[in-house]
């Protein structure tokens, strides 16, 4: 077990977190699963090799729970934390004026503040593990502001910016920081609501003619990002790659597509 590497994954009960856990565990890594969904974590753990995972109850909005979870995990790892995967997130779509106060607080507190807390509290463990990596889940919505996803998009821009800044700040500590920017991925997150409608985010994406990519491509991208010595950003899926290109060279076309998604969200 001395050569085993250790990854701690928030949002490990389903979706991207589960798929990344499976991918890393299949390559000999010990996986710490963290989530508010205990049953989901047990289901994920059952898919991993015996004795190669641990389960940690964690609401990423709580600094106290972050501290307890990472302390418990690093007790098992002998103080090592090769990768901290800040992946937990929520998706709530809809126009800004239709969001409730609770919608906005959930998006900001889970999608951004939870990532900041994880980075802040996890830094000492990453610094103590040579060649470690903080991996954050941003989004294709963090490439160019997404109409109908304004608050969600803003949180993902924030995660992207945080990742860029920390990769520079933590360079002297031999800690790399990487950001995944996936497009629309086939996970339970897409089944989340569009505020004040009977639609899911999946419905809106499909109506706008955009692709929904398999979750397996994110796991592969996560592995590549963790081992990439150079690139901070990983654009995952065809939509994300097109958006990255268009944001640089054809920003007007994105504004037109954003208008289409807004009209779809209004039912027009």
Image (tube, grey):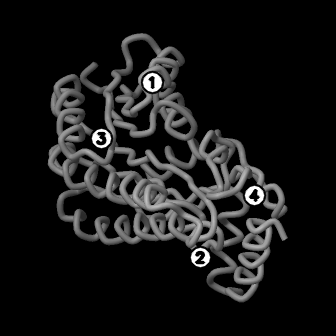
Please provide percent x and percent y for residue 197: 70, 56
Where's the C terminus, which quadrant?
A: bottom right
Q: Residue at image x 42%, y 54%?
A: 106
Tag of residue 205: 4
Between 231 and 20, the one lying in front of the other is 20
Element carrying mark 4: helix
* Nearest to N terminus: mark 4 or mark 1: 1
Q: Residues within 10 Å of mark 2 (few under 14, many from 20)?
A: many
> Which callout, 3 or 4, points to the residue nearer the camera?
4
Mark 1 sits on what residue? 41
**Label 2, label 1: how far apart the Cα atoms are:** 33 Å
Mark 3 sits on what residue? 82
**Label 3, label 4: how far apart the Cα atoms are:** 35 Å
Element carrying mark 2: loop
* Nearest to N terminus: mark 1 or mark 3: 1
Tag of residue 144: 2
**Label 4, label 2: how far apart the Cα atoms are:** 16 Å
**Label 1, label 3: how far apart the Cα atoms are:** 21 Å
Q: Quadrant of residue 184?
A: bottom right
Where's the N terminus, which quadrant?
A: top left
**Label 4, label 1: how far apart the Cα atoms are:** 28 Å
Please provide percent x and percent y for residue 138: 49, 59
Question: Are the residues tagged 2 and 1 within 8 Å (C-beta)?
Answer: no
Element carrying mark 1: helix
Q: Residues within 10 Å of mark 4 (few under 14, many from 20)?
A: some
């Amino acid at each position: 077990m001395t050569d085993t590497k250790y990854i701690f994954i928030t949002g490990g009960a389903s979706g991207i977190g589960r798929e990344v856990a499976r991918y890393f565990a299949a390559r000999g890594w010990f996986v710490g699963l963290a989530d508010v969904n205990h049953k989901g974590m047990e289901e994920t753990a059952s898919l991993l090799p015996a004795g190669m995972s641990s389960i940690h109850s964690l609401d990423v909005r709580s600094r106290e729970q972050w501290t307890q979870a990472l302390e418990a995990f690093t007790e098992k790892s002998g103080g090592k934390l090769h990768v901290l995967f800040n992946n937990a997130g929520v998706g709530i779509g809809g126009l800004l004026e239709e969001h409730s106060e609770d919608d906005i607080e959930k998006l900001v507190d889970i999608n951004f503040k939870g990532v900041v807390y994880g980075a802040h509290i996890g830094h000492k463990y990453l610094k103590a593990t040579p060649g470690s990596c903080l991996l954050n889940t941003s989004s294709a919505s963090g490439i160019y502001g997404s109409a109908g996803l304004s608050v969600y998009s803003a949180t993902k821009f924030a995660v992207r910016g945080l990742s860029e800044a920390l990769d520079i700040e933590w360079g002297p500590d031999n800690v790399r920081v990487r950001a995944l920017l996936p497009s629309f991925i086939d996970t339970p997150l897409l089944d989340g609501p569009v505020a004040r409608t009977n639609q899911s985010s999946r419905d809106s994406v499909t109506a706008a003619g955009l692709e929904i990519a398999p979750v397996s491509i994110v796991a592969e991208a996560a592995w590549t990002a963790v081992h990439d010595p150079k690139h901070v950003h990983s654009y995952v899926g065809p939509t994300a790659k097109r958006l990255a290109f268009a944001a640089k060279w054809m920003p007007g076309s994105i504004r037109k597509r954003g208008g289409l998604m807004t009209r779809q969200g209004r039912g027009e």
